[in-house]
Image (tube, helix red, strand yellow):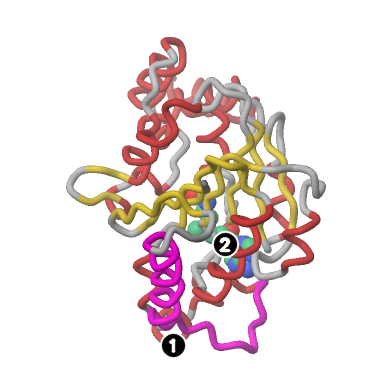
Amino acid sequence: MLNMLKSLIRKIIGEKHDDKLRFLRRFINDPAVGITYAFTNVLHEPDLAKIGTFHKTDKADSNHSFMNLSYLDIYEKYFYELRDKNISILEIGVNDGASLRVWKSYFKHAMIYGIDIDPRCKRLEEKRISIENGSQDDVDFLQNCFGQGTKFDVIIDDGSHINSFTIKSFEYLFNNRLNSGGIYIIEDLGCSYDKLQTNHNIIETWPGMKFNDPTKMYDNNRKDMDVFFLDKIKKLDHLEGNILSIHFWSMFCVIIKA
Ligand SMILES: C[S@@+](CC[C@H](N)C(=O)[O-])C[C@H]1O[C@@H](n2cnc3c(N)ncnc32)[C@H](O)[C@@H]1O
């Protein structure tokens, strides 16, 4: 009887992009997570990892945790002060929109922007979430997305994890689209050592990757990232450039703009 009622409600509310319906849907499917999220939200107690679990982003799961700290546990150290501010957040890599909804829940007054090479991501737009379709290695696209005047306070790269693309996006976005004091996060640096195409056939197996050029071999060479990071560290040591600090954590790094 209860199950019939649940499936009836599920049918009625469907998969609509509405916060209240999303909550109801999650509550029916997993009451424990739903109740925890409700308390977090009502009390507005900052707990990014709980919000992440509610929205089912992998940034809070055990594959993205080290020493019992998930990405989101650590991000909260940087994001806490910003949570009530009127800021703009850009994420490269939208997939099913889970992380964009996490930012929207946590940052009550922020505008959330996502870019993804997969044109299907556009359907995930909702109030305070705007999405554009393009590649993170296309500087013309990065220059024009969301209007040239839009600058961001936080940028997160969770896109292709192809080293050359990661570096190209950083060099453009950090210098031109990130506000002073802004935070730039490069995720999943474990991939930077990996022969992505030879070992994992990422074009076939990773979401959205087939929209990159299928004729290219996207194998990473960690040396490229090492050269990239060493150049930034050298500038820091010589009192040059516009980076205030670089913090390395397990699998990601956080770069703060001066
Ligand atoms: C790991 S998923 C993103 C997950 C999402 N950030 C989350 O945490 O819920 C990676 C996304 O990067 C996108 N992507 C792959 N290559 C890209 C490129 N060249 N430019 C922009 N996005 C790309 C894929 O389409 C995929 O949706």
Which of 199 and 226 lies nearest the eye of the viewer?
A: 226
Residue in the foreground of this view, choosing between 9 and 21: 21
Q: Is residue 178 left or right of residue 206?
A: right
Q: Dividing the image into four quarters, tell me where ligand 1 lies.
A: bottom right
Q: Quadrant of residue 169?
A: bottom right
Q: For disc 2, does the CB lie below 8 Å from ligand 1?
A: no
The crowding category of the residue bearing disc 1, from other C-alpha atoms within 10 Å (few below 14, some 14 to 19, many at least 20), is few
Which three-letter amino acid code belongs to the residue tagged 2?
Phe
Quarter of the image for residue 242 reads: bottom right
Tell me where the magenta segment starts and ends, as one range.
211-237
Using the image, tell me which numbered label, if any, was put on residue 170.
2
User: Relative to 223, is 83 above or below?
Assistant: above
The spot of residue 108 in percent (x, y) is 57, 22
Q: Is residue 120 above or below residue 195?
A: above
Residue 239 appears in which quarter of the rendering? Answer: bottom left
Residue drawn at (55%, 88%), measured in percent from left and top? 217
Please give the residue where the numbered disc 1 appears in the rendered image: 198
Element at badge 1?
helix
